[in-house]
Image (cartoon, rainbow, N blue to C red):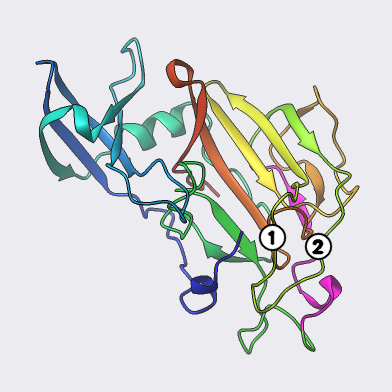
């Protein structure tokens, strides 16, 4: 979902836009912790009241659990510092989890890694939104009242990672666009695709055009494979492609958005 702020401040994400911040401290139960701080999350929707932060830390590969989840309320002390080397980023690279190609070639990045999806129950902190601008900075021609007016609508989508198709919807209607970003999207269902890329990591791509997906459940795709075209389905006011790398936390039975990086 694109919010109004997007059109006033377009975030162009750098391939290296992820500082290596480390955290150490002690929990109320006396347990000491140390690890790379991935994000301070708020587990709430944007319309809900603010809650205490939750911290996800990445630990040195070889540990029993790569990631650990610490609610702020359980912390007795917390200290942070920064260094140039990122264990997390190095782990992704070694495990073939850097994005290998442009997801929508020729598109423009609207948000990426430091985007506006911060208050979506930890599902969107590092989501990427892709659209397409003309030389005047507009995403559409004429008045933008038809999906076909949007330059990104119908552009081809390619998988940036290899993986197995474990979830998809493809038969939902595309919404009429709302260039003013108003309207009721409750009950809308996204046309989407989810790939299991390297457990516990998953890739989700959202807002495909109706009936455009070229893959089926159980299919194995390679990086660079054609997946479908950009639409305006589900929770979306105007055509764009939304995607994010997810971590599945077994202990909590839930997915959480984590940073992704390019390698091309």
Disc number placed over residue 179 in the picture, else none: none
The N terminus: image quadrant: bottom right
Q: Residue at x 28, y 41 (%)?
A: 53
Q: Earlier in the sequence, mark 2 or mark 1?
A: 2
- 7 relative to 225 in the view: left or right: left
238 vs 35: above or below = below
Q: Residues within 10 Å of mark 2 (few under 14, many from 20)?
A: many
Q: Is residue 97 left or right of residue 206?
A: left
Q: Is residue 61 magenta?
A: no
- Seen from the viewer's position, the closer of residues 42 and 79 is 42
State left or right for residue 71 relative to residue 25.
right
Main secondary structure type of the part rendered in magenta: loop
Res. 182 image quadrant = bottom right
Label 2 sits on a secondary structure element that is loop
Q: Are marks 2 and 1 in contact (CB under 8 Å)?
A: yes
* Residue displayed at 29% across by 35% down: 55
* Rendering coords of residue 140 (x, y %): 74, 80
Which of the 4 image quadrants contains residue 84? top left
Residue 176 spot, x, y in % from top left:
82, 68
Q: Residue at x 64, y 40 (%)?
A: 204
Q: Nearer the viewer, residue 108 or 6?
A: 6
Measured in 3D between alpha carbons, the distance from the residue under mark 2 to the one under mark 1, in whole angstroms, is: 7 Å
Task: Please provide percent x and percent y for residue 62.
Answer: 33, 12
Q: Which SS class for mark 1?
A: loop
The residue carrying mark 1 is 236
Which residues are the magenta region? 144-159
Q: Identify the residue under disc 2.
A: 175
Q: Residue at x 76, y 74 (%)?
A: 151
Crowdedness near tag 1: few (<14), some (14–19) or many (≥20) residues, C-alpha within 10 Å: many
Image: 241 above or below 177: above
Q: Vertical placement of 108 versus 39: above or below?
A: below
């Amino acid at each position: 979902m694109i919010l109004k702020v997007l059109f006033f401040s377009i975030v162009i994400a750098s391939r290296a836009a992820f500082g290596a911040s480390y955290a150490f401290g002690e929990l109320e139960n006396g347990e000491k912790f140390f690890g790379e701080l991935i994000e301070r999350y708020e587990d709430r929707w944007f319309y809900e009241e603010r809650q205490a932060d939750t911290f996800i830390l990445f630990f040195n590969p070889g540990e029993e659990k790569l990631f650990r989840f610490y609610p702020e309320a359980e912390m007795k002390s917390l200290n942070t510092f920064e260094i140039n080397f990122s264990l997390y980023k190095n782990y992704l690279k070694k495990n073939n989890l850097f994005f290998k190609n442009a997801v929508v070639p020729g598109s423009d990045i609207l948000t990426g890694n430091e985007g506006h999806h911060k208050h979506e129950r930890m599902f969107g902190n590092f989501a990427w939104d892709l659209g397409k601008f003309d030389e005047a900075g507009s995403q559409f021609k004429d008045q933008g009242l038809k999906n076909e007016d949007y330059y990104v609508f119908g552009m081809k989508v390619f998988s940036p990672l290899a993986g197995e198709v474990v979830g998809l919807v493809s038969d939902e209607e595309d919404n009429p666009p709302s260039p003013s970003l108003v309207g009721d999207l409750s009950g809308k269902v996204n046309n989407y695709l989810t790939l299991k890329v390297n457990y516990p990591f998953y890739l989700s791509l959202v807002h495909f055009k109706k009936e455009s997906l070229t893959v089926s459940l159980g299919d194995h795709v390679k990086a660079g494979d054609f997946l479908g075209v950009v639409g305006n389905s589900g929770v979306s006011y105007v055509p764009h492609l939304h995607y994010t790398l997810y971590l599945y936390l077994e202990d909590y039975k839930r997915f959480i958005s984590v940073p992704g990086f390019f390698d091309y």
